[in-house]
Structures are given as structure tokens and as C-alpha cells.
Image (cartoon, helix red, strand yellow):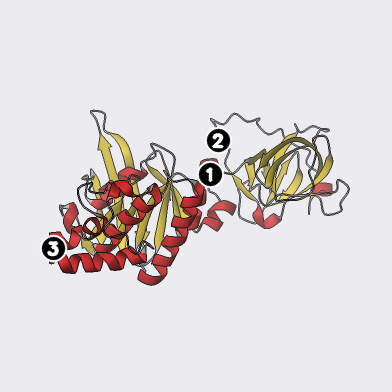
């Protein structure tokens, strides 16, 4: 139930002006792995899934499964199964016959097909649901049946088109755990699309960030979080901190002072990005703090809080704002003086976005030794 999927130069253009819905996408999905396509609405992620499934024909490029070019191969003969955002169960069939559908199409007897269907219902933790009508199921149960139906087809690639987005938070978490268990037992090759970076992180071994029909970056989520290649990637992954400045000889100079950058960065304007979860707040006079600042905003997120700190009120450089996401603990009121600590291994510098509504960096004084670490 796992195949090696490769997308090579996948492109789809439409309309009289041949505008690209998808542009030259290359992606490798190793057998038994799970790759999450992450992007906002209209980014082309569902288009990519439909091209992979054979529901649409690409303008250019190929879908290759286990070394075989699938160009011209009908969707039902590609060895893939898709689960959509809506379960799309057959209302006139009971649960077992819904799951048994692929076997029945292949000519398996109804008794044998229903027996296998019950096995897959057990896999998705719905034992005893075989005679239930789809209309009697909850939303989460419907998606489990849809997943069982897809797995019963024994696909070489399982395609998931935001199948959990309509579920509430608790049910989504249950489905994530279920998919983890299914991967341990069956090791399917999974290609899924989502607009939620937390879901991509939970379900994907690798995450591919798509925007405007173009693949911006792919890799393990941890690397994408700490080493985004652009502001667009950082924002799509929920990053909140963007500090304009200047890079000189491996140091980023801004209102935060001079911070060492551990990856090669060209001299010139650059935007420092750092995950809010990585920012630490200390006493304002702590020796390891990178800069002192003042809390200017507090936003609660359940047991966690987003604390915005303004740094750099004096000197030739405009002040900057840094957001830290903190766990449960004593509240930090607006107006509290704090120190900001940015772990060097969590810092990245990307090119400035010309369309971003952010202040351009002011050239800082050449000597910044006091701020270096």
C-alpha cells in the first residue's frame, strides 16, 4: 500500500491569457512517507492534488508512480484513493457497503467485500458500525468511514484534500492520532493538502509550502520554522517577528543591536525572522539579554499568551517590536520592563519584501561591538 510518487515540472495554465494555476512544481514523495502541501486558499494546492489523482490534465509536467509515467492514465487506474473535505458517502448504502465499494467494483463477492470492510472499520476504530446508515453518523465518524473506504481500495498513494478542516479542534486531534496509528500499521504513502501549518506539522514528515502556484520551499517543518527562505514562507508558517536591519559580515544590525547570523547571508538590507516560541523574556538587566524593552501588548491564547515588546526607543535606529509566545506562568502586564533573549540558532535573515508594510532599516553606526555576542 505504498508507492514512490514523483511530480516533475507539474504545470497547469488556464484561460485565454494562460495564467498559471500551478507552475513547474517538482516534488518527491518517498514510499511510506507523508508529505503535506501547505498554502493559503487559491495557492494551487488542491489543483496539485487533482492533477496527481488524474482528475485534471496538466499543461506540462508528469506524475510518476514507481517509475511509471501516468500521463494519459485514467484516475481510476492510477492506484490512488482520495479523501475530500466532505466525506461524500453514498447515502443509499450502509457503512459496510460504502467501505466495500472498491472491492465490489473489482468483482469481489458482497460477502467477502463486507467482511474486509469490517476489518477496515476496525482499523479506523468504528467496530460494529457496518450496518449503520451514513445519515446516522457524526461528522468525525463520517470522515473515518471515508478514510476506511479509501484504505480498503489498497491505494499505492493516499491523497487527502483537507479532510479534517470541517471538524472541531478535539475531533481533528483524534483524526491526527488515528492517522498516526494507521501509518504505523499500514505505512501508506500520503500526500495531503492543508492551509493550517499546525496540521501540516502534525501530519507531514515533509512540508512543501505553496503560494501563487509555485513551490516556495520544502523540507522538515522544524527547518522551515527556523530557516525560512522568504518572508512569504515565514508568514505562511505563522511567524510573527520581522525586524528590518542591515547585514554586515555575518551580523544583523537593527534596533535589537547586532546579532550573529549562523547561515551565510549577503551584506545589505535584510529582515531578521525568529519564531515567537523561541523568543525568551528575562529581567531587563539580565546579562544574557540581547536588548531591553517594554511590554506594549498582551494577548491571551488559552493557557498561553502573546507578549509584544517594544525595543530600541533611543538612538538612530527606529524602535522594533518583538513578539514572544509564553506558556502558563505569572502574567506580564503592559508597561513592564523586560529583557529580550533571542537564541542564535533560532535566527534567520531573509530578503526584504518590497510589498510589505514595514519600515525600511536605517543605516546604523559602523561600530556595534557593544551589541555583539
Q: Which residue is mark 3?
A: 106
If you read the primary sequence from the N terminus, does the residue marked by circle 2 or circle 1 appear first?
1
Q: Distance of mark 2 from mark 1, alpha carbons?
A: 8 Å
Mark 1 is surrounded, within 10 Å at the Cα level, by few (under 14), some (14 to 19) or many (20 or more) other residues, namely some
Mark 1, secondary structure of its residue: loop
Mark carried by residue 230 = 1
Depth order, front residue of 54/259: 54
Q: Residue furthest right?
A: 285
Q: Position of residue 352 (x, y in %)?
A: 58, 37
Residue 273: quadrant of the picture: top right
**In the drawing, does residue 251 fall left or right of residue 83?**
right
Q: Position of residue 119 (x, y in %)?
A: 29, 68
Depth order, front residue of 24/105: 105
In percent of the image, x 23 and y 45: which residue is there? 58
In percent of the image, x 53 and y 53: which residue is there? 224
Mark 3 is surrounded, within 10 Å at the Cα level, by few (under 14), some (14 to 19) or many (20 or more) other residues, namely few
* CB under 8 Å between discs 2 and 1: yes
Q: Position of residue 122 (x, y in %)?
A: 34, 66
Mark 3, secondary structure of its residue: loop
Depth order, front residue of 71/39: 39
Depth order, front residue of 122/173: 122
**In the drawing, does residue 253 fall left or right of residue 124?**
right
**In the drawing, does residue 18 fall left or right of residue 206?**
left
Q: Distance of mark 2 from mark 3, alpha carbons?
A: 53 Å
Q: Is residue 71 among the parts visible in the rendering?
A: no
Mark 2 is surrounded, within 10 Å at the Cα level, by few (under 14), some (14 to 19) or many (20 or more) other residues, namely few
Quarter of the image for the N terminus: give it.
bottom left
In percent of the image, x 53 and y 44: which residue is there? 230
Mark carried by residue 353 = 2
Amino acid at each position: 500500500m505504498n508507492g514512490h510518487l514523483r511530480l516533475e515540472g507539474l504545470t497547469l495554465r488556464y484561460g485565454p491569457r494562460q495564467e498559471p494555476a500551478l507552475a513547474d512544481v517538482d516534488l518527491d514523495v518517498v514510499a511510506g512517507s507523508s508529505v503535506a502541501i501547505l498554502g493559503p486558499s487559491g495557492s494551487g494546492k488542491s489543483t496539485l492534488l487533482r492533477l496527481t489523482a488524474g482528475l485534471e490534465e496538466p499543461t506540462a509536467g508528469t506524475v510518476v508512480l514507481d517509475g511509471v509515467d501516468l500521463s494519459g492514465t485514467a484516475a481510476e487506474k492510477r492506484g490512488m484513493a482520495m479523501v475530500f473535505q466532505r466525506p461524500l458517502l453514498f447515502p443509499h448504502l450502509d457503512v459496510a457497503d460504502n467501505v466495500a465499494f472498491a472491492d465490489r467494483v473489482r468483482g469481489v463477492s458482497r460477502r467477502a467485500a463486507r467482511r474486509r470492510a469490517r476489518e477496515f472499520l476496525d482499523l479506523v476504530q468504528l467496530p460494529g458500525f457496518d450496518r449503520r446508515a451514513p445519515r446516522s453518523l457524526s461528522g468525525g465518524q463520517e470522515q473515518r468511514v471515508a478514510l476506511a473506504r479509501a484504505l480498503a481500495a489498497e491505494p499505492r498513494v493516499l491523497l487527502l484534500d483537507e479532510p479534517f478542516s470541517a471538524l472541531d479542534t478535539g475531533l481533528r486531534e483524534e483524526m491526527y492520532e488515528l492517522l498516526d496509528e494507521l501509518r504505523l500499521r499500514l505505512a501508506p504513502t500520503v500526500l495531503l493538502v492543508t492551509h493550517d501549518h499546525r496540521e501540516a506539522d502534525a501530519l507531514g514528515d515533509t512540508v512543501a509550502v505553496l503560494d501563487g502556484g509555485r513551490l516556495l520551499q520544502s523540507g522538515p517543518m522544524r527547518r522551515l520554522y527556523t530557516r525560512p527562505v522568504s518572508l512569504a514562507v515565514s508568514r505562511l508558517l505563522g511567524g510573527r517577528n520581522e525586524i528590518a536591519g542591515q547585514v554586515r559580515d555575518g551580523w544583523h544590525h537593527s534596533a535589537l543591536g547586532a546579532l550573529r547570523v549562523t547561515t551565510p547571508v549577503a551584506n545589505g538590507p535584510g529582515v531578521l525572522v525568529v519564531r515567537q516560541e523561541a523568543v525568551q523574556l528575562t529581567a531587563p538587566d539580565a546579562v544574557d539579554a540581547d536588548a531591553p524593552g517594554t511590554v506594549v501588548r498582551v494577548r491571551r491564547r488559552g493557557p498561553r499568551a502573546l507578549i509584544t515588546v517594544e525595543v530600541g526607543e533611543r538612538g538612530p535606529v527606529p524602535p522594533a517590536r518583538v513578539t514572544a509566545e509564553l506558556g502558563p506562568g505569572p502574567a506580564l502586564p503592559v508597561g513592564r520592563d523586560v529583557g529580550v533573549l533571542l537564541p542564535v540558532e533560532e535566527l534567520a535573515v531573509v530578503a526584504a519584501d518590497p510589498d510589505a508594510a514595514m519600515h525600511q532599516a536605517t543605516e546604523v553606526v559602523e561600530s556595534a561591538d557593544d551589541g555583539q555576542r
